[in-house]
């Protein structure tokens, strides 16, 4: 049985801060869709509070999820000092006015600052092709950090070309690039580009191989490793990310699953196990979010 008090491993970011490598994603919940954004959604609040009770500390949110208000209420009701939590949020449709967007997000979250603020996607900039727009948005992100409204700043869904564009004028290197990442979408060139700049990679959709993309060629290897470590195949997927220094952003509304995911603090995959899983993963390609429309090569 997992000891839920075993600390979640942390990764040092290029700005010297540490980020918990297992995060509770708030973007999967669907219940908010029928409600006004300001209306508190008890299902979302209770989901976040459950994760807090289980000792999750890192919460991944976004302007576009329309649930910053709910995460804010969950933090307040949990009575946990926000200093002991790690809150990520992202800007999407307000990317043209990032200065106001962060203030609006902080108001909804009832926080003086977030730990990590991300540009949700590069597509606002003429589907990622307008370098100047990307650079202007990044400059505004640097101001958010300079103003003390976000400890760290980063990006999401950026491909190597988008990183190169902003790095031409950046004063601050993004701390993190949050992208879809799992054995059927290992993003080798993108992870290499992130590494080149010292940018941490964060994975969304890390369970895709056991959920949306199942069945597939990694199934036998996942089952065998799950038996060896007495965990579920999902936890092997999470560890496959973490053992490659990738932050895993997952979620569930089931207490048992959320609790089980914390068993990732109890084991580590060997380099050979990671290699074997990656080799099997290479036999299939699956992309669940932001499809080919946005990348010249879907596998990028
Ligand atoms: N930056 C971006 O563009 C994006 C960010 N995200 C963030 O990442 C978070 C996690 O994304 P997901 O794709 O949901 O991650 P995920 O791949 O970890 O999947 C989690 C989902 O799988 C389900 N699940 C877990 N174990 C299962 C099992 N054994 N069998 C069947 N279903 C199972 C859970 O109930 C949950 O709905 C989101 O909540 C959001 O915060 C997600 C998508 C895009
Ligand atoms: O973050 C990516 C997935 C996602 C979940 N809800 C929304 C709403 C708007 C854009 C993207 C998403």
Image (cartoon, rainbow, N blue to C red):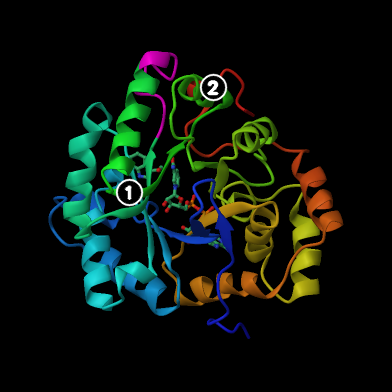
Ligand 2 sits in which quadrant?
A: top left
**Left or right of 243: which side holds 132?**
left
Q: Locate residue 17, reporting x and y percent.
A: 48, 55
**Residue 150: image tag:** 1
Q: Earlier in the sequence, mark 2 or mark 1?
A: 1
Query: In the image, what residue occupies the spot 47% across and 37% down?
Result: 174
| Residue name at image x 65 percent, y 33 percent | 196
> Where does the C terminus fall, quadrant-wise?
top right
Q: Residue at x 16, y 62 (%)?
A: 40
Left or right: 215 as drawn, with respect to 283: left
Q: Is residue 293 above or below residue 259?
A: above
Number of other residues with Cα within 10 Å of mark 2, as a class: few under 14, some 14 to 19, many 20 or more: some
Question: Of helix, strand and loop, which mostly describes the magenta segment?
Answer: loop
CA separation, marks 2 and 1? 23 Å
Q: Position of residue 289 (x, y in %)?
A: 49, 37
Quarter of the image for the N terminus: give it: bottom right
Q: Which residue is mark 2?
A: 164
* Residue 131 x/y as whole percent: 42, 15
Instruction: Indicate yes or no whether the magenta region holds residue 129.
Output: yes
Callout 2: helix, strand or loop? Answer: helix
**Count of numbered tags:** 2
Q: In the depicted view, which residue is nearer to us: 200 or 40?
A: 200
Magenta range is: 121-132
Some atom of ligand 1 lies within 8 Å of the CB belonging to the residue at label 2:
no
- Percent coordinates x, y for residue 95 in the rendering: 28, 30
Provide the secondary structure element on which disc 1 rests: strand
Magenta stretch encompasses residue 174 = no
On screen, 244 above or below 254? above
Which quadrant holds residue 11?
bottom right
């Amino acid at each position: 049985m997992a000891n839920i008090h075993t600390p979640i491993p942390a990764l040092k970011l290029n700005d010297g801060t540490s980020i918990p490598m297992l995060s509770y994603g708030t973007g999967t919940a669907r219940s908010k869709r029928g409600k006004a954004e300001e209306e508190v959604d008890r299902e979302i609040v209770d989901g976040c509070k459950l994760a807090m009770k289980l000792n999750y500390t890192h919460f991944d949110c976004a302007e576009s999820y329309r649930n910053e208000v709910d995460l804010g209420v969950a933090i307040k009701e949990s009575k946990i000092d926000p200093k002991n939590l790690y809150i990520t949020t992202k800007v999407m449709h307000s990317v043209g006015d990032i200065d106001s967007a962060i203030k609006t997000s902080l108001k909804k979250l009832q926080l003086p600052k977030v730990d990590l603020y991300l540009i949700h996607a590069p597509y606002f900039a003429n589907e990622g092709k307008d370098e100047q727009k990307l650079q202007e948005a990044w400059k505004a992100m640097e101001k958010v950090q300079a103003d003390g409204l976000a400890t760290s700043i980063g990006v999401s869904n950026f491909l190597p070309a988008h990183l190169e564009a902003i790095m031409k004028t950046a004063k601050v290197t993004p701390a993190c690039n949050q992208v879809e990442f799992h054995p059927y979408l290992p993003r080798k060139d993108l992870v290499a580009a992130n590494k080149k700049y010292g940018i941490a990679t964060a994975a969304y959709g890390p369970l895709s191989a056991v959920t949306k993309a199942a069945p597939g060629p990694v199934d036998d290897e996942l089952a065998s490793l799950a038996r060896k470590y007495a965990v579920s195949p999902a936890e092997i997927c999470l560890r496959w990310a973490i053992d490659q220094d990738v932050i895993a952003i997952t979620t569930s509304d089931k207490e048992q699953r959320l609790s089980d995911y914390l068993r990732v603090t109890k084991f580590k995959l060997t380099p050979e196990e990671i290699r074997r899983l990656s080799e099997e993963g290479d036999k299939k390609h699956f992309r669940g979010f932001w499809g080919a429309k946005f990348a010249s090569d879907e596998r990028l």
